Amino acid sequence: MGTSEWFKVRGWNIERLLFALHRITGWGLTAFIVLHVLFVHQVTYGERAWNSLLSLDSTFLGRVVLLLVVVALIFHGLNGVRIMLIEFGYLLTEPKEQEYPYQVWLKNRRHRGYVLFMGILGIFLTIVAGVILL
């Protein structure tokens, strides 16, 4: 298995989608941090270069990109908490012998509840961020 498995959508469920989005947002946020450091480095080239970069932030496109970064951060953070709760055993059912076909984790009421909570909180925070940024 390699990275090509990330893009095979046959047989996907919500858990697989959350997994894929977590990886995509992780890579996107990493790219943003690298680009952010490079842009902040432009301050060493003088005030004129710095102001030209700041003018990009004040455009509508710049605000939309910033909103997308905030949405990725919200999702990645909330999904990361979900993953930690799974790792600590709080969102898992009682262990039992697995039989084929394997059950998906989201049949657990606590896990479904957290995913629903994560979605509602994510939408609320996105709306708040959208109002502030746009």
Image (cartoon, rainbow, N blue to C red):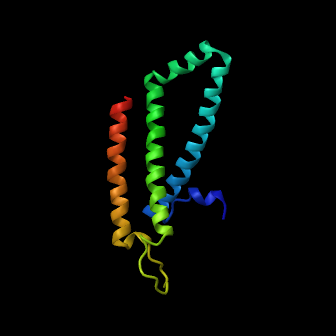
**Of all residues shown, which one is farthest toward the bottom?**
97
Task: Please indicate whether residue 52 sits to the left or right of residue 127 in the image.
Answer: right
Camera sees residue 12? no
What percent of the width, then of the height, locates residue 78? 43, 54
* In the rendered image, the vertical position of residue 53 relative to residue 75, given as above or below: above
Which residue occupies 66% across, 61% down? 2
Instruction: Specify the quadrant of the image occupied by residue 32.
Output: top right
What percent of the width, then of the height, locates residue 109? 33, 71
What percent of the width, then of the height, locates residue 73? 47, 45
Instruction: Specify the quadrant of the image occupied by residue 67.
Output: top left
User: Could you say which is closer to the camera, residue 15 or residue 128?
Assistant: 128
Which residue occupies 37% across, 49% down? 122
Which residue occupies 49% across, 82% down? 100
User: Could you say which is closer to the camera, residue 84 or residue 106?
Assistant: 84
The C terminus sits in image quarter = top left
* In the rendered image, the vertical position of residue 88 relative to residue 82, given as above or below: below
Task: Please indicate whether residue 86 sits to the left or right of residue 30 in the image.
Answer: left
Camera sees residue 113? yes
What percent of the width, then of the height, locates residue 111? 38, 67
